[in-house]
Image: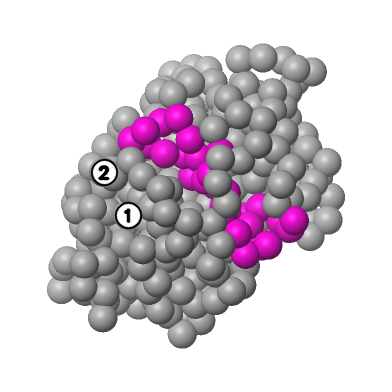
Amino acid sequence: MPAFKAPAPGFSVRFSPFHENRLLAAASQHFGLVGNGHLIVLDLAAAGPGPGVAPVPVFSFPTSDALFDCAWSESHESLCAAASGDGSVRLFDSALPPAQNPVRLFREHAREVHGLDWNPVRRDAFVSASWDDTLKLWSPDRPASVRTFRGHEYCLYAAAWSARHPDVFASASGDRTARVWDVRDPAPTLVLPAHDHEVLSLDWDKYDPSILATASVDKSIRVWDVRSPRAPVAQLAGHGYAVKRVRFSPHRQGMLMSCSYDMTVCMWDYRAEDALLARYNHHTEFVAGIDMSVLVDGLLASTGWDEMVYIWPFGTDPRAM
């Protein structure tokens, strides 16, 4: 299957919501501790026909600090955002040459920005999650943040918009909670004591707006119904180390994808008795980024600290050429 060797350890990968052959990847030197970052747009079609052909980088922009996450705009096909270790959020236009990028630079967070997510319903805004314990709502057309959300007691690692409600998003924190927010209210509408250890990632079910999955340092994924959050509706155990990211499928209800510091990617159906559907061992270092294509059913991507980006269909071997 297609694979790309990045210039540095990978932290995030996202499929384009406009072009089925395009992906966005964020990478950082020295595992994000020091050094430069790289934002890369990959194109599968540009490499020509044939299985296993490596994707071609059609846009690459080096940054002066590490990049921990990235997100495509939901309203402009060439616009994307990157979360930086210097506390900034940068907007790039891949249709413009590097000399004209970034097209906007937001500097409001006091510490590293670790998570980004673009609103898929309203499409005109995105949210950032920072180690300064805050979240910020942004519009690409405004020079400053629209609102700041406070309440978490430790680092923010991720944020995720609801796929159904235009004003609702959730956040994952090192304070061991996940919180649900409405952009019209500065305080969270729900504080969920999700795990006994840091919560690193979360995502909303694309078919049931009440279902939220959380991933933790405790090696588990928990699935919650936010209408009755006293206990999880499912707990998925199978990773050997912290679960770095979790994603719900945009095509198959109940299906999740996860990645871990145990160097594996797993596929799950949280509603099934045997929830683990597949385990992939193609990476040779920590796996930090995963995604599922919204345009192609079953098309998966992952990136990790082995500097590799893999793209493959569910049910096949990512290393098969």
Where is residue 225, by image quadrant? bottom left
Residue 25 horizontal/vertical position (percent): 59, 39
Please tell me which residue lies in front, 247 or 10.
247
Q: Amino acid at mark 1?
A: Trp
Left or right: residue 22 compared with residue 237: right
Q: Is residue 72 above or below residue 89?
A: above
| Quadrant, the N terminus | top left
Q: Is residue 97 magenta?
A: no
Q: Amino acid at mark 2?
A: Arg
Q: Nearer the viewer, mark 2 or mark 1?
A: 2
Residue 118 colored in magenta in the image: yes
Mark 2 Cα-neighbour bin, 10 Å: few <14, some 14–19, many ≥20: some
Q: Position of residue 87 (x, y in %)?
A: 73, 50
* Label at residue 204: 1
In the picture, measured across the screen, residue 169 lies left or right of residue 24, that is left
Residue 206: % across, % down: 26, 47
The magenta stretch is 110-138
How far across and how far down the image is residue 190, in percent?
36, 68
Mark 2 touches mark 1? (CB < 8 Å): yes
Q: Circle 2 sits on which residue?
A: 164
- Residue at disc 2, secondary structure: loop
Q: Does 16 sit left or right of 55 as displayed? A: left
Q: What residue sits 54% from the left and 21% below the top?
A: 78
